[in-house]
Amino acid sequence: MQAERFLRVGPPLMVLDLTLYEVANVVARKYGELEVARKLVQGLFHGSARPPLQADVTLFEDGLELMSEHGLTAYDAAYVAAARHNGWQLVSLDIRDLVSKGLAVTPDAADYP
């Protein structure tokens, strides 16, 4: 598995700190690719327009509302809340929980500046 398969160089990324843990969880734990996970997390740090956004009380509170309204996990709700708070377009491959509900778009449907 190659890191380039998961991370494209393009417009500046904006990421939530939780994203780094989710990448590590999927790539290192699920696929057993520790070095690929390390490269991806480094790529997210270096490819981001600013340091990862930290979750805070406001995101948590808004996330609770989104969880209730859309049946989301706390993680997904945090991503939606962060995107809404910052005027970001949320890009995801989570078709079932985010894209199908109009809360995110797929990478192919994203509007890249």
Image (cartoon, helix red, strand yellow):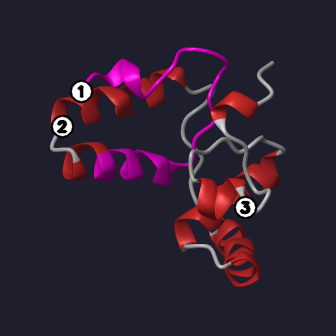
Q: Which mark is residue 37?
A: none
Task: Choose top left, top right, bottom left or bottom right for residue 60.
Answer: bottom right
Task: Choose top left, top right, bottom left or bottom right for residue 91.
Answer: top right
Question: Position of 18 compared to 88: left or right?
Answer: left
Q: Nearer the viewer, mark 3 or mark 2?
A: 2
Query: x%, y% of residue 37?
Result: 27, 36
Residue 23 painted magenta: yes
Q: Give the residue pinned by disc 2.
A: 33
Question: Position of 84 compared to 38: left or right?
Answer: right
Query: What kind of residue is marked 2?
Result: Glu
Query: x%, y% of residue 108?
Result: 68, 29
Residue beneath the point at 76% across and 57% down: 103
Q: What SS does tag 3 mark?
A: helix
Do callouts 1 and 2 mark residues in contact (Cβ within 8 Å)?
yes
In the image, residue 58 sits, relative to residue 30, either above or below, namely below
Q: Earlier in the sequence, mark 3 or mark 1?
A: 1
Q: Nearer the viewer, mark 1 or mark 2?
A: 1
Q: What SS does tag 1 mark?
A: loop
Do callouts 3 and 2 mark residues in contact (Cβ within 8 Å)?
no
Residue beneath the point at 36% across and 30% down: 40
Q: Which residue of the protein is positioned furthest toward the top in this rendering?
A: 9
Query: x%, y% of residue 76?
Result: 59, 63
* Label 3: how many Cα within 10 Å (few below 14, some 14–19, many 20+): many
Q: Give the residue pinned by disc 3.
A: 81
Quarter of the figure with the N terminus: top left
Q: Give the residue pinned by disc 1.
A: 1
Q: Which residues are magenta?
A: 1-26
Quarter of the figure with the C terminus: top right
Query: x%, y% of residue 106?
Result: 67, 39
Q: Nearer the viewer, residue 57 or 106?
A: 106
